[in-house]
Image (cartoon, grey):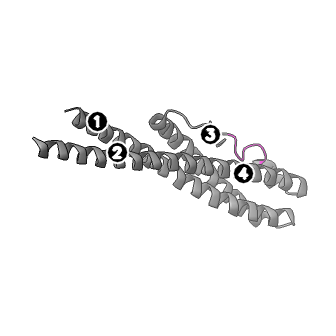
Amino acid sequence: MQLQKEIGRLEAEDKELQEVLDAGRDVHVQVQQALNALDSAENWGVVDMMGGGMMTTMMKRDRMNQAKNAMTEIEYLLRKFRAELSDIAGADTVGAANFGKEWSMMDYLMDGFFIDYMVQQEITESLSNMRRLEKEIERVCATIQQRKEENQRKKTELRQEWQTQMEQL
């Protein structure tokens, strides 16, 4: 009877671990989207700093808006992930609320190297934050996956032990 209780406990824990993994994968997908948009914005930003003009600024801003939308979704998904996991060290927010606001209008109106450079710094910082978040999510999910695999191994052992006990009766 004790073996069955332990198997049941491990199965319930496996369900919780899978929910954490699913939430982590959802965050990871959005982080990838943000990284892609930020990489593109960074590339357009380099062109913009070299005098790319209004069209280049528009392309850069479009990619920044895509990244901001992804970051907003990431913040929502991180809350869900944290609720499943209870805590992710070092990943409080990803900064979507202020991303791109400070220099947006100046980027269009005073299109020049200084403003382009300041916007580029913001893009680079956000890109760095997203990369750190991506690594943290991957690390946490890998740890959860290992724990899940260990539970599977324990359940197999317990079931074999239970089967042996039943055969001896």
Per the rendered image, the range of residues in magenta is 98-103
Mark 2 or mark 1: whose residue is earlier in sequence: 1
| Label 3 to label 2: alpha-carbon separation | 32 Å
The residue carrying mark 3 is 91
Which amino acid, by three-letter code, is at mark 3? Ala
Disc marking residue 154: 2
Tell me the distance, in whole angstroms, between the alpha carbons under discs 3 and 4. Answer: 13 Å
Closer to us: 56 or 10: 10
Nearer-N-terminus badge (1/3)? 1
Q: Please, what secondary structure does the residue beneath circle 1 have?
A: helix
Closer mark to the observer between disc 2 and disc 4: 2
Cα–Cα span, label 2 and label 1: 9 Å
Identify whether 60 is placed above or below 133: below
Q: Earlier in the sequence, mark 1 or mark 4?
A: 1
Q: Earlier in the sequence, mark 2 or mark 4?
A: 4
Could you tell me if the residues under marks 2 and 1 are in contact, i.e. CB atoms within 8 Å? yes
The front one of 118 and 145 is: 145
Task: For mark 3, give the secondary structure.
Answer: loop
Q: Residue at x 64, y 38 (%)?
A: 90
Marks 2 and 4 sit apart, C-alpha to C-alpha, by 39 Å
For discs 3 and 2, the disc positioned in front in the rendered view: 2
